[in-house]
Image: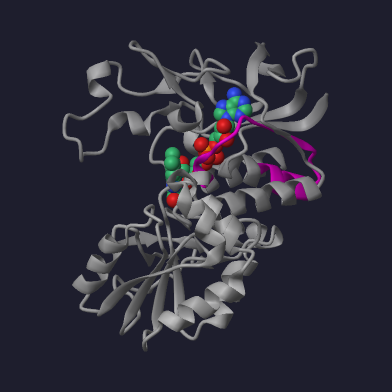
Amino acid sequence: MKFQTIIVGGGLAGLTAGLALQKKGISCAIISSGENALHFSSGTFSGDCPEETVRLFEEAGIVLKGDPAKDSWRLTPSGSMQKVRLAFEDVTLYPSEKINATNVLIANPEGFIDFPTAFIADGISQQGIPCKVKSFSLPCLKLLRESPSEMRSVGIAKKLDGCIEEVAECIKGLLDGEDLVILPQVFGLASPEPVRALRAAIPAEINFIGTMPPSVPGIRVQLQLKKAFERAGGTFLMGDTAIMAEIADGTVRFIRTKNLDSHILSADNYILASGTFFSKGLTSSMQKISEPLFGLDVECPEERTEWYSEDFFAPQPYMAAGVKTDKDLHPLRDGQPISNLYAAGSILAGKKNAGMALTSTFKVVKKIAL
Ligand SMILES: Cc1cc2nc3c(=O)[nH]c(=O)nc-3n(C[C@H](O)[C@H](O)[C@H](O)COP(=O)(O)OP(=O)(O)OC[C@H]3O[C@@H](n4cnc5c(N)ncnc54)[C@H](O)[C@@H]3O)c2cc1C
């Protein structure tokens, strides 16, 4: 099978690259093994984000709040405030390190333990704002509650998205003059409509805060990007893994995947957006950190003892490991760039956040679509 561009990895970088390229008329295939960092997302993007992000996401039906070039603040599940650039529409952003409220209600489905209400309440109280925690119970959650392992964010969202009016009535019944209601991110799995409907129905600001993974808004955004990519004509090979790449004379000739073992996939250009250790874009043995598909040069400390810091709270050097590239983001193999291969996202060496993933992605898109 022949495409103009083949992308390895269907996370934020791979999907954004695929969607942007398809929109420019460049036929793409994305090979995507599975879970990616969006599935664990806080619902916010940190780091400088390119201007193009907001428009491209909007075309995919995804509303991003905030300014891609200016910091806003979000309330985190630990009750602290964190600088971010952009946020999914679930999250309320604040212009300073203080939430904008005079009286807060944190409302949590009864029996849901993946939402740290005590930390959030403590953080808000430390800002000098009164805060109460209440739980609500709905008949549709009864079965889930009977099996605690089912009482997880995605399972709850599947139930609550189907009865938003009841949820709204329940929360209105808990209100006692509060002007901010904090809810866990357990709404809007397949579309943002439940989030919007709750905001419209409840007479107070609503801020949806992250839960323990999986991330409901992250899964939704990944699905929206995937659908937009497919609508634009892209081919998404879901659940497939690139297992072998043929390289000759400094160019990639073709890729083989696990599911299409009798076919080769070839393209004019290839993008490696396979993420970091978490997504198996990088692997490690006792001796070294490697990029497993193309055998690329990896930037990381030589000695294993330098991969990590003894201080648990210090930045861990292995977290910054990634593939080496030239200035045009062509990865190096034995010190030489591969001319039709680009690297984008957290597979690159250095700081890992959404801003960095998106900046490198749009840079690669511009190179390919020249
Ligand atoms: C758990 C976690 C949570 C994060 N949360 C945030 C956040 O809230 N905000 C923020 O700004 N940053 C966050 N980050 C930083 C994150 O790195 C970036 O935001 C960004 O999402 C990374 O996107 P990516 O596409 O480069 O990689 P990934 O999201 O890791 O996607 C890589 C994809 O490639 C696939 N893949 C790997 N190898 C192959 C192969 N051989 N064949 C086919 N597919 C393959 C993987 O299965 C995966 O789907 C988080 C990182 C992690 C690890």
Point out the residue furthest to the bottom here: 177
Residue 229 within the segment the image draws in magenta: no
Q: Quadrant of the C terminus?
A: top right
Q: Residue at x 26, y 62 (%)?
A: 118
Q: Position of residue 200 (x, y in %)?
A: 58, 81
Q: In this rendering, is residue 53 above or below 171? A: above
Residue 19 within the segment the image draws in magenta: yes
Q: In this rendering, is residue 214 above or below 310? A: below
Q: Is residue 343 visible?
A: no
> Nearest the camera: 114 or 103?
114
Q: Position of residue 51 (x, y in %)?
A: 56, 60
Q: Residue at x 46, y 75 (%)?
A: 206
Quadrant of residue 82 within the rendered picture: bottom left
Quadrant of residue 205 within the rendered picture: bottom left
Q: Quadrant of the N terminus?
A: top right
Q: Residue at x 27, y 17 (%)?
A: 304
Q: Position of residue 145 (x, y in %)?
A: 46, 54
369 left or right of 178 in image:
right
Q: Residue at x 31, y 85 (%)?
A: 102
> Nearest the camera: 176 or 66?
176
Q: Which residues are magenta?
A: 17-38
Q: How is the image coloured?
A: one colour
> Nearest the camera: 189 or 21?
189
